[in-house]
Image: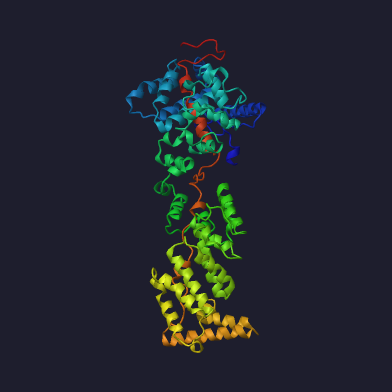
Amino acid sequence: MGSEDVSVNRLGGGSGAGKPPFTESMTRAEMVEAWRARRSARRSAATTGPEEVVDGFALRKWRRAGVFGAEAVARVEDMLRELLESIDTEDETLRWGADTIRACLDGQPTPQLLPAVKQLLEAAEPGRAVAQTAAVLSAVHEVGLPWLSPAGERRLALIAGADPAVDLDTNGLLRPEEDPTGAFALQQALARRNLSELTPRHLRAIMPSAPLGIIDDLIEAGVLDRGHQPWTLRADVGEQSYLLARLAPEKANAALARSLGWDEPGEREAFLSGEPLQPAPGSLYDLLLRVTDGETNVLKELEELLPRELLLRLRKVRDGATTGSWDPDIPADRGLWRLMCALWEPRAAVNPARGPFYALVALRHAYDLIRRGERKKAQAQVDKLVDHEGGPPEQAAEAWNMFAYLALLDDNLDLAYVSLARVARTDQRVEENLTLLERRRGTKRNDRDQPANPYLELGLPHKSEQWKHRWRERRRAGGDDLDLAARANWAKRRIEQAERTEDWSGFFVLPLDPVSLRLPTARPVSLAPPPAAMPRRTTHRAAVDLATVRDRALADLLPTLLTAPRRPDHDHRTTS
């Protein structure tokens, strides 16, 4: 049986077994039939042995205390003996109550019986008081004892589910003094499956002592939220931390999260700070790390894990790649640059004046075009770069270095030299290339080698160790393209010669520093969700939680236990 099917109103207690369950789904006829079956079973049990028999004298003596019938007498005596067994016999403050109950069991029940029962219940240890009181009042209800005030008896009937349709406000049943812990109102709301009927006063009373699973039920029902601050009302430190993480996760630091075995806050903190992180494959932060590296094949998985606001932002990143245009807040997050570059391949020269992201893309685009041998397109992009004066000095140096290389390929040595000379005043990295240009200018035209950097001719960065593999690829891909094959073979010979002599001074160095072309390794912090609430760890409507609420509601009826029982007609009380 699942927790959803467990009766909220199952009343037990005492040592008896096989008590009839009274559930929300039973009709009144079914409840009456279950009660009759129980009564018949007890009557049969009463005749099974000499010690089980309730004689006529016992029936008569208990009748004046409001206990009628053999079954009721046996049940009450069992309940009183269990109550005596549960107390500390060395406690002098309980001696009167214990002696009174023993006297009632051994002789004639007196009007002091109920005050004695009440004394022992009120003096019970905190951990046992609720369970003991619930057991006693369950027995009172089962045998129909007139030991409660009219208001208490009415509430007991409601807790037992005898009349669950009765209005909770009837006859002032929910006055604060009669429902100090809010357990009665909570038990009825759970029985009706309508937690929204609980008032703010009820919630204030409920929060300190209700089972944690019930608190979670209230949270999920939208009845309890962070404004109620339930973590401030719980005595247990672990429960305080749990509820804080559930309702105010931004206040849950990494240490608190670790104490709960909750990884998400620590992962989020490490992600935002750039610390090493090893999330579970397919988890939110695993996918975000892969996006940081520019992996586009994880976007659909990531969309499923992001809240709506961030989902829309991610879609803006993806959609902007269609035209290569994004709102300023997108490239403002440098952690998105790798993803944006992976999604966008420029088809024309990029305007670096649009911002830092576009300036870096323009520089990388020019370099890629040079390596692909697309000189006209490269020249158009480099022209935009050198015309842009607002970029960082290192990017400007790279742009003028590319400009000089393209002029070198056109054998325009004077333009190439002038271009680098203007950079040399602030950036000494171009000195090697300036020296190459000076040497080439001093060499007769017919004695000059081909000006291209052989590594760039193979589409590789300067001094790349992968040149042999790329040369083979070019040879295989060239097929009947004799010109492509000739350029590849020329590059191979030049590189081999440089490696033999360990002299690469005849190669124009481009880029001056590969780092200047790299995309940032920052993480996309704008895609990191705000602190998420800790997932629920308790069971919805768990049977033990429902039973705890019911027992607490029964225990709150203790003040309505009378000093003397009422007669069945409720017209007067016995006095002796």
- Which residue is depicted at the point 50% across and 34% down? 548
- Which residue is depicted at the point 61% across and 24% down? 163
Q: Is residue 19 visible?
A: no
Q: How many marks?
A: 0
- Which residue is depicted at the point 41% across and 85% down? 502
In this picture, residue 227 sits left or right of residue 375 = left
Q: Is residue 421 visible?
A: yes
In this picture, residue 91 sits left or right of residue 80 = left
**Whole-percent x and y of residue 561?**
47, 20
Quadrant for residue 31, please give it. top right
Scheme of colours in the image: rainbow
- Against 322, is 541 above or below? above
Q: Nearer the viewer, residue 391 or 202?
A: 391
**Whole-percent x and y of residue 550?**
52, 30
**Whole-percent x and y of residue 183?**
50, 28
- Which residue is depicted at the point 53% across and 64% down? 361
Q: Nearer the viewer, residue 371 or 125?
A: 371
- Against 69, is 225 above or below? below
Residue most toward the bottom? Answer: 447
Quadrant for residue 503, please give it. bottom left
Which quadrant of the rendered structure holds the N terminus?
A: top right
**Whole-percent x and y of residue 139?**
52, 26
- Against 164, is 394 above or below? below
Q: Nearer the viewer, residue 380 or 203?
A: 380
